[in-house]
Image (cartoon, rainbow, N blue to C red):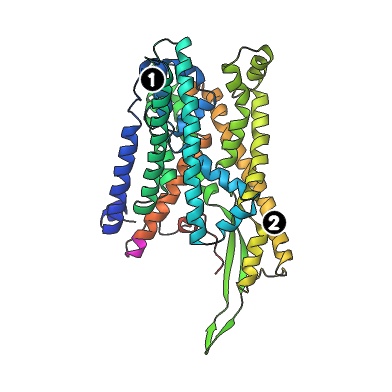
């Protein structure tokens, strides 16, 4: 098979999209290194180290280290992601939001506008909280904030809020004029920017004898196998066969019968169950960092990352949120109704309620595999850290791995479609990348 990479720049439209995306990402990474006025980022990074295993540390990973430097883009894309998830969850409670999602383009535009307004509110609230947090750091590490007071709170909050809105705009520009999903790509590049530094630190441990060369060889082999497994599970689906009968359309037109399928992804919930579970189980450790209460310190010790109780509760929470989030984003009743309107049916199953029950039955059992898979991926970093004794510099596995693989596959899928449209050979002669995440009824 010829190398398809040079063909990327032979398609004018695709070339423009790739160059535009790279330009926007360069602007984003540049803004992630400009510290807000009045903050000494050197002192801040020293003080921020104690919060690495808290919610702040997780947030810092998603924004590419911008939070630990208090840059103008410290909040990153997370306020917009939080607002989007909020409306997605609220759609299951408020019929108005669910109705807007089904109204087509007009409804989606209105919901997008609401999401933007919610993003501004969330960014302002987070900006105020982080500004006060930065100011409080002066008590433990003098010099983090050079001039404390209301003026610093006001200016830093305004900068953080404007930065979050600017990042939201950058993400939308990538989605509309670039290649791939803008929001996902911003998180993708925020995560991978830390890979070279973590790899260098691991290599230093090898050269100093902390880790043996054999352990590194085994670690690389495990990483390759895990990546292959994650790619396979991300693309895997359970196909439910669907029959579309022959139909006379009028004026002599006839629609021939078709055979298709409904792909139920093994991991329908994506990375969200891990994020939800991680946000909850890390609360005791986060609270203990800001408090000196005895029982809270004890609870934090039992729920330290990698501890037995932590692993068990973490896995159970992931299983729970996998089913919870799947039930939110996937409605078997709506799917059965849409199938019935098209005249389609599942062979051996009556249309309507029986079809919805059958889809729910299959989805429930497929989700078991997906939930176990997510739990294993989330616990993988702790097992490897203990096995190879490489410390907290390990960057491979869990949430970051799922995001990186998922975004990479989606971006490759879009490039594949552009190249095949212009009659260029794509990245794969055979494969199902182009069907990933899509529901095919006809």
The secondary structure type at the circle numbered 2 is helix
Locate residue 193 relative to residue 324 in the image: left or right: left
Report which residue position mark 2 lands on: 360
Report which residue position mark 1 lands on: 204
The secondary structure type at the circle numbered 1 is helix
**Residue found at the very far front of the displayed protein:** 150
Q: Please tell me whether residue 195 is drawn above or below residue 284 in the rendered image.
A: below
Locate residue 128 relative to residue 323 in the image: left or right: left
Please name whichever residue, 153 or 263, is drawn nearer the observer in this view of the structure. Answer: 153
Residue 47 located within the stretch drawn in magenta: no
Indicate the position of residue 191 as horizontal and vertical percent values.
43, 35
* Residue at the image position 64 percent from the left and 28 percent from the top: 311
Please name whichever residue, 292 or 319, is drawn nearer the observer in this view of the structure. Answer: 292
* Residue at the image position 52 percent from the left and 62 percent from the top: 104
Quarter holding residue 413: bottom left
Indicate the position of residue 231 as horizontal and vertical percent values.
50, 46
From where the camera sits, is residue 140 visible? no
The quadrant the C terminus occupies is bottom right
Mark positioned earlier in the residue sequence (2 or 1) = 1
Q: What is the span of residues highlighted in magenta in the rendered image?
A: 419-423
The quadrant the N terminus occupies is bottom left
Q: Residue 270 carries which label?
A: none
Indicate the position of residue 111 as horizontal and vertical percent values.
51, 52
Quarter holding residue 339: bottom right
Q: Please tell me whether residue 369 is drawn above or below residue 160 in the rendered image.
A: below
């Amino acid at each position: 098979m010829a190398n398809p990479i040079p063909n990327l720049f032979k398609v004018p439209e695709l070339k423009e999209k790739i160059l535009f995306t790279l330009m926007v990402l360069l602007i984003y990474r540049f803004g992630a290194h400009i510290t807000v006025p009045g903050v000494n980022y050197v002192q801040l990074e020293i003080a921020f180290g104690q919060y690495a295993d808290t919610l702040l540390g997780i947030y810092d990973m998603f924004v590419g280290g911008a939070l630990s430097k208090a840059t103008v883009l410290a909040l990153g894309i997370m306020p917009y992601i939080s607002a989007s998830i909020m409306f997605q969850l609220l759609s299951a409670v408020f019929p108005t939001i669910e109705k807007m999602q089904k109204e087509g383009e007009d409804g989606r535009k209105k919901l997008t506008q609401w999401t933007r307004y919610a993003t501004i509110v969330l960014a302002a609230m987070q900006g105020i909280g982080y500004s006060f947090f930065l100011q409080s750091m002066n008590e433990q590490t003098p010099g983090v904030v050079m001039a404390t007071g209301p003026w610093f709170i006001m200016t830093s909050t305004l900068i953080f809020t404007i930065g979050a809105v600017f990042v939201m705009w950058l993400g939308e520009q990538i989605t509309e004029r670039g290649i791939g999903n803008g929001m996902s790509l911003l998180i993708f590049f925020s995560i991978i920017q830390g890979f070279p530094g973590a790899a260098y630190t691991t290599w230093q441990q090898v050269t100093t004898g902390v880790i043996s060369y054999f352990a590194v060889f085994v670690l690389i082999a495990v990483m390759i196998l895990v990546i292959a497994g994650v790619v396979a599970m991300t693309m895997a689906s359970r196909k439910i066969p669907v029959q579309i009968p022959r139909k006379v359309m009028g004026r002599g037109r006839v629609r021939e019968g078709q055979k298709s399928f409904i792909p139920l992804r093994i991991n329908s919930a994506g990375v969200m169950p891990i994020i939800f579970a991680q946000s909850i189980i890390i609360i005791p450790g986060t609270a203990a960092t800001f408090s000196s209460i005895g029982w809270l310190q004890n609870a934090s010790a039992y729920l330290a990352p990698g501890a037995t109780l932590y692993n068990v509760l973490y896995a159970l929470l992931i299983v729970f949120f996998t089913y919870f989030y799947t039930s939110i984003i996937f409605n078997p009743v709506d799917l059965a109704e849409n199938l019935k309107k098209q005249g389609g049916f599942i062979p051996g199953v009556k249309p309507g309620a029986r079809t919805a029950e059958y889809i729910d039955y299959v989805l429930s059992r497929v989700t078991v595999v997906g939930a176990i898979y997510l739990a294993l991926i989330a616990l993988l970093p702790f097992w490897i850290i203990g096995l190879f004794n490489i410390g907290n510099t390990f960057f491979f596995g869990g949430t970051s791995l799922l995001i990186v693989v998922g975004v990479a596959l989606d971006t490759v899928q879009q490039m594949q479609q552009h190249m095949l449209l212009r009659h260029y050979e794509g990245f794969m002669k055979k494969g199902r990348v182009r069907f990933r995440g899509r529901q095919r009824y006809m």
